[in-house]
Amino acid sequence: MKSESTYKAARIVAESVETIFADHLKKATILGEDNLAFVPNSSLIDSFIDVGFWTSLRHEEGRTPRISLAYLMPEQAGTPIIFAQPIPFTPKNLTKLSAGYERAGIHLGVWHDEHNTLYVWGATLSLPNCCFVLDISEAGQVVIKHRRIDGFGKFSNIAVLAGDEIKIVDEQNSTNGSCPKIVSSLLDFTSITSRHDTVNVMLQLAVSMRSHKRGGTLLVIPSQTKEWRESISHPLHYAIKPVFSGLADLIKQNKIDNSIPNWQAVLSKEVDIIGGLTAIDGATIINDEYKLLAFGEKIVQRVGQPIIERVIETEPIKENKPTVVFPSKTGGTRHTSAAQFVQDQPNSIALVASQDGRFTVFAWSAKEQLVQAHRIDSLLL
């Protein structure tokens, strides 16, 4: 059942979202995947977004609802909680339910009757592959996602709607092959064929960095080199010796035997160790093998190198055009220093989180001979 109010952006984006999900389902079927979700039609997607948006603007005991809604039948949900009576799909009811179902990994199950009217049938921890999910986590913002086939890590974002702003993720990756493989792979995690390889660890690190909401910088430098030290103030404040290899060892061990119990949970803890350090003022430094080298360090301009004056700013959303801007346009001093580091150390990348949620990956483009600033917060919500 739809709310009386109408959210114009829901109507604008509904058909595009249906097409995207239908394409995902088609690709997954060709790949021979099973346990696939059903695709909601554009009318149902319109209702989903409309009700979700107005729910996000309500309050329950002074709190904004935080809730995840999934489109599936109870039969697809493993061992769900099933309500004796279906609950009408309205902002009022969702706001009331949100207090009990706001924890990560819990989804309210939503289906429709013969009149195409949505209702809430219960709650579940288990979802089919490519399942349509709508997350409400901030006032005035909803995020449309799908469950990745391997079920590993965060769900892949399809679209972000905030007020009258609509961002549809460019799943084809508009970087034109102009950035390092590790960055391209991180941007491409929305792909229906993405699996939990080591690149996914970068995604988990980005999510962890963003979650503490203090802002931070993570520098990823090549192993077997010490040139990065020329771009860091000395003496180092918090160098790690010997280097901490908890995350690196875990990844390496799992590649060998692929049998570590609760590997995902252990990985999450190791990722949070590094992600948490980025909350400390200064840059955290790891190498491309995920070994921790230092944290809380100040970035300085490398001797003999020019001050960075331009970067190419991109965002992996449809219709976005790369633009050349001053480094300061990408954010504050944290962003500018990270861009300077990458210009001086072109084999490195820098991940920068802002307190307001903005997230940027800086990498050197050999094609453009400039630092590229890839804004990816629309992928991390």
Image (cartoon, rainbow, N blue to C red):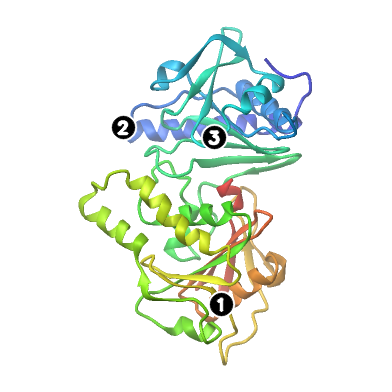
Of 208 and 23, nearer the camera is 208
Which disc, if any, is residue 87? none
Q: Secondary structure at mark 3?
A: loop
Residue at the far left in the pictured view: 257
Query: Which is in the foreground here, disc 3 or disc 2?
Result: 3
Q: Crowdedness of circle 2 by 10 Å Cα count: few (<14), some, many (20+)? A: few
Q: For the residues marked 1 and 3, what is the alpha-carbon distance in whole angstroms?
A: 38 Å
Question: Can you say which quadrant of the picture contains the C terminus?
Answer: top right
What residue type is disc 3 on? Answer: Arg
Q: Residue at x 26, y 48 (%)?
A: 260
State how far apart marks 3 and 2 are (Cα). Answer: 32 Å
Q: CA distance from mark 2 to mark 1?
A: 44 Å
Asked whether residue 94 appears in the rendered view, the answer is yes
Crowdedness of circle 3 by 10 Å Cα count: few (<14), some, many (20+)? few
In this view, the residue farthest toward the bottom is 304
N-terminal label among 2 and 1? 2
Q: List the residue tagged with mark 1.
A: 341
Q: Which residue is mark 3?
A: 103
Q: How far from the left and from the top, in percent, is residue 363? A: 53, 69
Q: Earlier in the sequence, mark 1 or mark 3?
A: 3
Residue drawn at x 45%, y 66% is 180
Image quadrant assignment for residue 253: bottom left
Hey, what amino acid is under mark 1? Answer: Phe
Residue designated by label 2: 32
In the rendered image, the vertical position of residue 68 relative to residue 374, given as above or below: above
User: Is 91 situated left or right of 378 in this image?
Assistant: right
- At a point 23% along the width and 46% down the height, the residue shown is 259
Place residue 113 in its image quadrant: top right
